[in-house]
Amino acid sequence: MSMDVSEAYRAHAAFVWRSLRRLGVHGAATEDLMHDVFVIAHRKQATYVEGVAITTWLYGIARRVAANDRRKATRRSAAGPDRLPFVSSEPATQERELDYRRSTARVDEFLEHLSPDKRVVFELVDMEGLSCPDVATALSLPVQQVYARLRTARRRFEAYAAELASPTNEEAR
């Protein structure tokens, strides 16, 4: 592998952290497992295939690390999910923070009702910006299946957003 793992860490640590969170890792374990992903990447850098997006390769490692953590979690009590703090370059106002928390809660609610196979595709493509071929590689799926799952998830999200925007929906106000 011609890429430097320390450079990959600087460039992609935030992506790996978000991926682990979406894969169900919460609390202090997120940071620890993020570092584990890069330790494994360093050990297995010979398995990296040139031409494959580094984020695809790192996501595959993160997915296995998160799965191992879930298996271990059955032996320990699980802590509640943490929330990302509101971050802005401008001073935060209570109203903006409240809007951010409401929006985050609505997206989380939508994702909770989406099947796991569609959720992971929706998150990786629409929230993380990966391409469908890269997601297909990371998930070991035919690319057509990724496109189909994404199309279904997007339709459901559009319906969910339309329902929230409906004048009869008091919660949307």
Image (tube, rainbow, N blue to C red):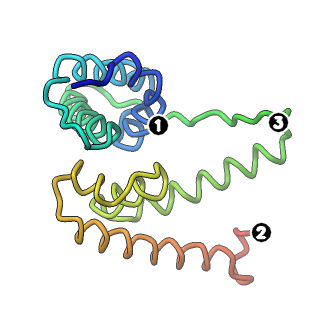
Callout 2: SS: loop
* Left or right placement of residue 10 versus residue 131 in this view: right
Q: Residue at 70% across / 48% down in the picture?
A: 100
Callout 3: SS: loop
- Image coords of residue 107 (percent x, y): 54, 58
Alpha carbon distance from label 1 to label 2: 26 Å
Labels 3 and 1 touching (C-beta < 8 A): no
Mark 3, residue position: 92
- Image coords of residue 17 (percent x, y): 43, 31
Task: Report crowding for label 2: few under 14, some 14 to 19, many 20 or more residues within 10 A (C-alpha).
Answer: few
Alpha carbon distance from label 3 to label 1: 23 Å
Alpha carbon distance from label 2 to label 3: 21 Å
Q: Residue at 50% across / 71% down in the picture?
A: 157
Task: Report crowding for label 3: few under 14, some 14 to 19, many 20 or more residues within 10 A (C-alpha).
Answer: few
The residue under label 3 is which amino acid type?
Ala
Task: Report crowding for label 1: few under 14, some 14 to 19, many 20 or more residues within 10 A (C-alpha).
Answer: few
Identify the mark at residue 81; answer none if there is no mark. Answer: 1
Mark 2, residue position: 173
Callout 1: SS: loop
Mark closer to the chain start, 2 or 3 = 3
